[in-house]
Image (cartoon, rainbow, N blue to C red):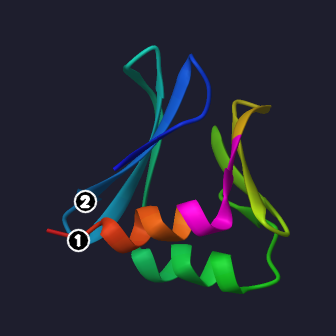
Amino acid sequence: MSYSLDSTFTFSTLPHHEKIKLVVFKNQLAYVCRIENKKKLNHFLTSKDTILFKGRLQLIKNQEEIFIQVKGTIIGTISTCVFKDLLQTQRTL
């Protein structure tokens, strides 16, 4: 399932074996990705933690929004409700 961040970037969740692959597309080409288990992603939503991941792709939580940061630049936001929906619709293979 995909979520458009703006005219350039799209955020997607894809099944990857027993995990979820988070992918940021730039102009419809995969730009950066991260593979993580669903349990850790759900924990991030419910915990007081504000940052998930280190490296090129980071998720930064601020109350009702999650900022998507790529290579040190925030490229868009997604509501925590939409992020939760993206995770719920993914079934791991």
Judge whether 82 appears above or below 6 on screen: below
Per the image, the residue denoted by label 1 is: 91
Q: What stretch is highlighted in magenta?
A: 77-82
Q: Residues within 10 Å of mark 1 (few under 14, many from 20)?
A: some
- The picture quadrant where one finds residue 48 is bottom right
Check disc 1 and give the amino acid type: Arg
Q: Which mark is residue 15?
A: 2
Judge whether 31 appears above or below 84 on screen: above
> Total label count?
2
Q: What element carries label 2?
A: strand
Q: Residue at the location (63% across, 37% down)?
A: 56
Quadrant for the C terminus, please. bottom left
Judge whether 5 appears above or below 14 on screen: above
- The picture quadrant where one finds residue 71 is top right
In the image, is 83 to the left or to the right of 91? right
Q: How crowded is mark 2: few (under 14 residues within 10 Å), some or many (20 or more)?
A: some
Q: What element carries label 1?
A: loop
Q: Residue at the location (42% across, 76% down)?
A: 38
Any magenta on residue 78? yes
Q: Residue at the location (65% across, 77% down)?
A: 45
Q: Residue at the location (37% across, 19% down)?
A: 29
Q: For this rendering, which residue is in front, 28 or 55? A: 28
Q: Where is residue 11 in the image (x, y as percent from the top left)?
A: 49, 40
Q: Position of residue 87 (x, y in %)?
A: 42, 68
Judge whether 89 appears above or below 48 on screen: above
Q: Where is residue 58 in the image (x, y as percent from the top left)?
A: 68, 49
Contact (CB < 8 A) between labels 1 and 2? yes
Check disc 2 and give the amino acid type: Pro
